[in-house]
């Protein structure tokens, strides 16, 4: 997997440490090269700096060509990734989520909240029963199922055409949720449960593989990277490979860079500047920045529920840059409005 990005936005200190020498002020960084390719371009290890992509060998240029991900079928409909990105509304059936814990902690409240998100314009819904905030306590299989299954079953009855995602890292929770009507597994551990790939493959479900350094309990304890963009992309590529080897259809996989999961403020900002590098993996990109703590660090807003404007700003910027295909958000109305403006003013196709 070969990645390219402009040096004007690269973390120079990290790159200098990685390459072992200073880098020029202008140019394009290539990473993921073979040692022979890197050496031929004057680089070391698996990286080199060139004046422009046009100066790269033909095989490197070919590896960098990216096409629009193929449509994915969810809930009996093909969802294409052209034009406005899709909106995945968050339904947290938990008492301790970082921004809205307890808001929808009962089945009735969660279903009401889900229907409200649909009214506001959500395209898909993501139902979760275990918080993944830093330091969150683990939830038992039975408790997690008791939280999410009644919600999925109720939504399947009320809005059968609405694609439902189950946000879980437990294979058995995923299996029961898929049986109940979910069609997508959103796994922050990228199939850390060795049984998860088999569950997804057997159900012919879609899945989102997220990058995380560590676990939700440890991920924010001094996360370290030499080149965060390359390392996240490389890890996601390996996750895709393992999933496909286990029988999951590659065309039904999403990827998520895991903003806020085992990353400092600087890591998050660098990733958001370079999300297009993940296009080299060929999978639709799901992005979750909604209300996260890095936005509080940038704006000074300590109340997560009040980070609506900054969350919408990340959506608009990523949409105009063509960096994401699905946005996982708490605030659907604000997100839809941000996307409408972004696409009216940006270079991509008009809003659907």
Image: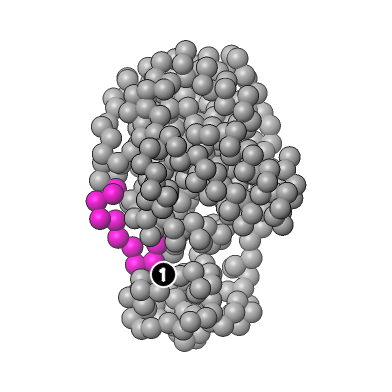
Which percent across, then down, holds residue 110?
47, 19
Residue that badge 1 annotates: 11
Which percent across, then down, holds residue 231?
40, 61
Q: Residue at x 63, y 70 (%)?
A: 62
Q: Residue at x 75, y 47 (%)?
A: 350
Return the residue nearer the eye: 147 or 11: 11
Q: Quadrant of the C terminus?
A: top right
Does 289 appear above or below 102? below
223 part of magenta stretch: yes
Q: In this rendering, does residue 72 appear at all? A: no
Number of numbered markers: 1
- Left or right: residue 124 versus residue 290 is right
Q: Residue at x 43, y 82 (%)?
A: 23
**Residue 61: which quarter of the image?**
bottom right
Return the residue nearer the eye: 257 or 33: 257
Does 343 appear above or below 53? above
- The colour scheme used here is one colour
Q: Main secondary structure of the magenta part?
A: loop
Magenta highlight range:
219-228
Q: In this rendering, does residue 39 appear at all? A: yes
**Residue 100: which quarter of the image?**
top left
- Left or right: residue 61 versus residue 45 is right
């Amino acid at each position: 997997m070969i990645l390219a990005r402009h040096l004007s936005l690269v973390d120079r200190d990290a790159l200098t440490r990685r390459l072992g020498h200073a880098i020029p002020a202008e140019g394009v960084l290539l990473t993921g090269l073979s040692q022979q390719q890197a050496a031929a371009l004057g680089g070391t290890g698996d990286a080199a700096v060139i004046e422009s992509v046009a100066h790269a060998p033909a095989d490197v240029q070919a590896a960098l060509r990216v096409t629009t991900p193929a449509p994915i079928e969810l809930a009996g409909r093909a969802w294409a990734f052209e034009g406005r990105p899709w909106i995945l509304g968050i339904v947290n059936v938990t008492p301790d989520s970082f921004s809205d814990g307890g808001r929808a902690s009962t089945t009735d409240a969660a279903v009401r909240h889900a229907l409200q998100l649909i009214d506001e314009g959500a395209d898909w819904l993501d139902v979760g029963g275990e918080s993944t905030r830093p330091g969150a306590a683990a939830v038992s299989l039975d408790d997690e199922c008791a939280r999410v299954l009644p919600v999925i079953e109720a939504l399947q009855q009320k809005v059968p055409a609405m694609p439902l995602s189950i946000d879980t890292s437990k294979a058995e929770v995923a299996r029961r949720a898929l049986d109940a009507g979910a069609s997508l597994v959103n796994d922050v551990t990228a199939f850390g449960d060795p049984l998860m790939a088999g569950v997804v493959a057997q159900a012919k479900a879609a899945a989102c593989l997220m990058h995380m350094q560590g676990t939700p309990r440890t991920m924010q304890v001094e996360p370290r990277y030499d080149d965060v963009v390359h390392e996240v992309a490389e890890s996601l590529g390996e996750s895709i490979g393992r999933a496909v080897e286990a029988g999951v259809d590659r065309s039904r996989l999403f990827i998520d860079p895991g903003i806020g999961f085992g990353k400092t403020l600087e890591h998050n900002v660098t990733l958001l500047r370079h999300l297009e590098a993940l296009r080299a993996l060929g999978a639709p990109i799901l992005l979750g920045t909604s209300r996260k703590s890095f936005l509080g660090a940038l704006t000074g807003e300590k109340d997560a529920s009040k980070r609506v404007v900054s969350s919408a700003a990340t959506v608009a910027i990523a949409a105009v840059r063509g960096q994401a295909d699905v946005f996982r958000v708490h605030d659907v109305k604000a997100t839809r409005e941000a996307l409408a403006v972004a696409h009216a003013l940006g270079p991509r196709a008009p809003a659907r």
